[in-house]
Amino acid sequence: MNKLYIGNVSAEASEEDFETIFETWNIPHSGPFLVKTGYAFVDCPDEKTAMKAIDVLSGKVELHGKLLDVEHSVPKRQRSCKLQIRNIPPDMRWEVLDGVLAQYGAVECCEQVNTDTETAVVNVRYAAKDQARQAIEKLNGSMMENCALKVSYIPDENAAPEGPPTGGRRGFNGRGPPRSGSPNLGARPKVQSDIPLRMLVPTQFVGAIIGKEGATIRNVTKQTHSKIDIHRKENAGAAEKPITIHSTAEGCSNACRTLMEIMQKEALDTKFTEEIPLKVLVHNTFVGRLIGKEGRNLKKIEQDTGTKITISPLQDLTIYNPERTITVKGSIEACSRAEEEVMKKIRESYESDMAAMNLQSNLIPGLNLNALGLFPSGTPGMAPSMSHVPPPGAGCSGFGGHPESETVHLFIPALAVGAIIGKQGQHIKQLSHFAGASIKIAPAEGMDPKQRMVIIVGPPEAQFKAQCRIFGKLKEENFFGPKEEVKLEAHIKVPSFAAGRVIGKGGKTVNELQNLTCAEVVVPRDQTPDENEQVIVKISGHFFACQLAQRKIQEILAQVRRQQQPKPAPGSQPPVPRRK
């Protein structure tokens, strides 16, 4: 990434002209200028110098009446999926940028590049060449908050050579997972796959953190190589405001310590005498592992750092606010050490969950997990396989267009009904709204007294979200032991004529389903079909096993439906749609 391409070069330009320009702007180069008709090449000693040349010269410096166009020199074979986007507004939030990039395809990774410029620079890798090409065409030169974006290819070391693939099964990459990002940019995290640090700060200190015309926060971001979002408009009138810090673990900790020091100084200047604890926001998914068995993990952090740590109660959670507040009291030095230890544990838990999610998502066809928002802050950066869309005609498994609604009967412990319903029905209403599904508790009559049936009606993604939250709620409310995995039974109905396809010849299909999904799948024999000519398939297992089995069975049903559709008679013409 150190070789530069210089375009829009006048026919009169010479090597000496470029020597003069680079010397004037104090940009070193490590080789001679190769000047051709209309363009030139030069090597820089390192990536940082190449970036400086692009930022300082491209579109800004004129040579013989022509504005130079400077970008990374990328061989044609390496113009694949990796782009660099420059001149991004410095105060743009990551969520906004993620949304812009996602318009053109699945983003595998997005990492910020250290530069000395006021605006931000990111390297982006798309899942496919055509997605990257479309992003360049649409984004290059487009305006974003008064900044014209500059988008160019950067070398993609993993670009497959042109021509037919050699080896490997179709649809599989025989070279293993793609390497993430450029090797020269290891100092920055993959923003999309890293947990940000979220803090709560007293509202009266927000002004001091921002500083006059934003000078203080700009200095903090520059010194700590971080991206800091101060959510001033959230919770109008609240005593505290959330702050999100995106960076490496070290960058987040440095920024956190600096913000604590700013608040401490402001407190002295304004004679504010109350203690200012460090408050970190953590998604409830990770809190149990942070606390540890019998509170051991938390006690160890307290002992090692000399701090007092408390965690907000579960009752404060809602389905829309899944974060708990970790309050740390002690000196700035002690609080800073505690933050490092707390976030280290959180990141380990997150990475473990993501590894499990990636593993399972490869097996769950059609689920766009990226859109589910099951992870903190709607964590972007899911693996590309998670946004896989099945081919047209995939029936219930596909989420493009208008997916078909499904009905699942999920059986929960009878004692857990109150927790699922919530006070005055609030939890089940919020859950239904969140998932986009109808969720009802069936009456207890005629059922096993130890179990109750939850009826969930909605498309596949709504099923995933609703069932995920129910499994999670049962774990949170301790209906299963700390080392016990939540395993539930789900029933889905299938047309009686399709039951044989689910079972397979000699039970082959159902056995394969069980081996693949790790769920127990049973089609009870001698069932009498109901009034809709349907029979029950029982699925038992942990959450991902149940989901995978449900999706695989729906795939089989979609295939049966397609085969049941009448074929047009030979020689008949398909109906021509009338124009409106």
Image: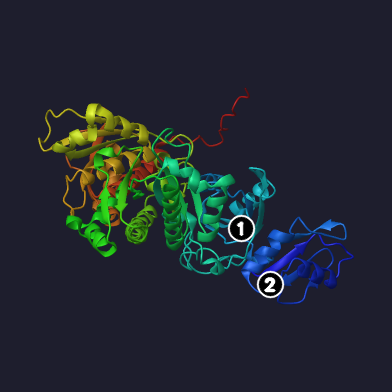
The disc at residue 44 is 2
Identity of the residue furthest to the bottom in this view: 31
- Quadrant for the C terminus in the image: top right
Percent coordinates x, y for residue 2 in the rendering: 65, 70
The 10 Å Cα crowd at callout 2, few under 14, some 14 to 19, many 20 or more, is: many
- Does the image show residue 378? no
Q: What residue is drawn where x is 27% and y is 64%?
A: 304
Nearer the observer, 223 or 52: 223
| Element at label 1 | strand
The 10 Å Cα crowd at callout 1, few under 14, some 14 to 19, many 20 or more, is: many
Disc with the residue nearer the chain's start (1 vs 2): 2
Percent coordinates x, y for residue 442 in the rendering: 20, 29
Q: What residue is drawn where x is 88% and y is 60%?
A: 64
Which residue type does callout 1 highlight? Leu
Percent coordinates x, y for residue 158 in the rendering: 55, 66
Q: Which residue is mark 1?
A: 83
Protein image colouring: rainbow
Is 214 on the left-hand or right-hand side of 138? left
Q: Is residue 39 above or below residue 353?
A: below
Q: What residue is drawn where x is 18% and y is 33%?
A: 418
Which residue type does callout 2 highlight? Cys
Identity of the residue furthest to the top in this view: 580
* Snapshot quadrant of residue 250: bottom left
Q: What residue is drawn where x is 44% and y is 33%?
A: 236
